[in-house]
Image: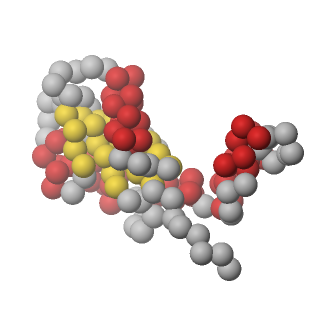
Amino acid sequence: MENETKPKVIIVMPAYNAATTLEKTVKDIPQGFVDEIILVDDSSQDDTVRIAKTLGLTTMVHSGNMGYGANQKTCYDEALRRGAEIVIMIHPDYQYDSSVASLFCGDHWKRRLRHHLGFSGPNTERVSWFRDAPL
């Protein structure tokens, strides 16, 4: 069996007034597959930031409400700046079930993504790093 290194996985959370659901969202994330969770708060009026810090999340706060698009951009920029190889966005309002987040990192997902994007054929030189990555 090859000696594979685990990709750096960062979960990002664009937050606005998510104090009532943040803890449940974080607690439902499966342990052991994520390297860091970054919460970007868009100038919430509740205790979102305090709760995020209590949970040990890397927490960033916009100085004013910049909107959802700007919040997403900050999330992705920060995750990439920190060297993420896989970035998973989870809404801290529990809009989606955070307990399935690890499914986006397994071999099954990588195979499906390769097939869906057409990266399995011989004419994929541009994306050979993905096509040839070990499963």
Judge whether residue 61 can be spotted in this image.
yes
List x then y, in percent, for residue 11: 40, 49
Left or right of residue 89: residue 15: left
Task: Using residue 49 as the reference point, say whether residue 11 is left or right of it.
Answer: right
Provide residue 99's location: percent of width, then percent of height: 46, 58
The residue sitting at the front extreme is 125
Relative to 45, is 132 above or below? below
Relative horizontal placement of residue 115, taking residue 11 as reference (left or right): right
Q: Where, quadrant-wise, is the N terminus in this rendering?
A: bottom right
Q: What residue occupies the far right of the structure in this picture?
A: 122
Q: Quadrant of residue 108?
A: bottom right
- Judge whether 44 appears above or below 25 on screen: above
Which image quarter is the C terminus in? bottom right
Count the marks.
0
Residue at (58%, 70%) from the top-left corner? Answer: 4
Q: Residue at x 81, y 48 (%)?
A: 120
Name the residue: 24% across, 35% down: 41
Res 16 quadrant in image: top left
Query: Is residue 68 visible to us here?
Result: no
- Residue 43 horizontal/vertical position (percent): 18, 28
Residue positioned 14% across, 30% down in the render: 45
Which of these two is toward me, 77 or 29? 77
| Colour setup of the view | secondary structure
The quarter of the picture where residue 124 lies is: top right
Q: Position of residue 21 (x, y in %)?
A: 29, 46
Give left or right: position of 53 versus 113. left
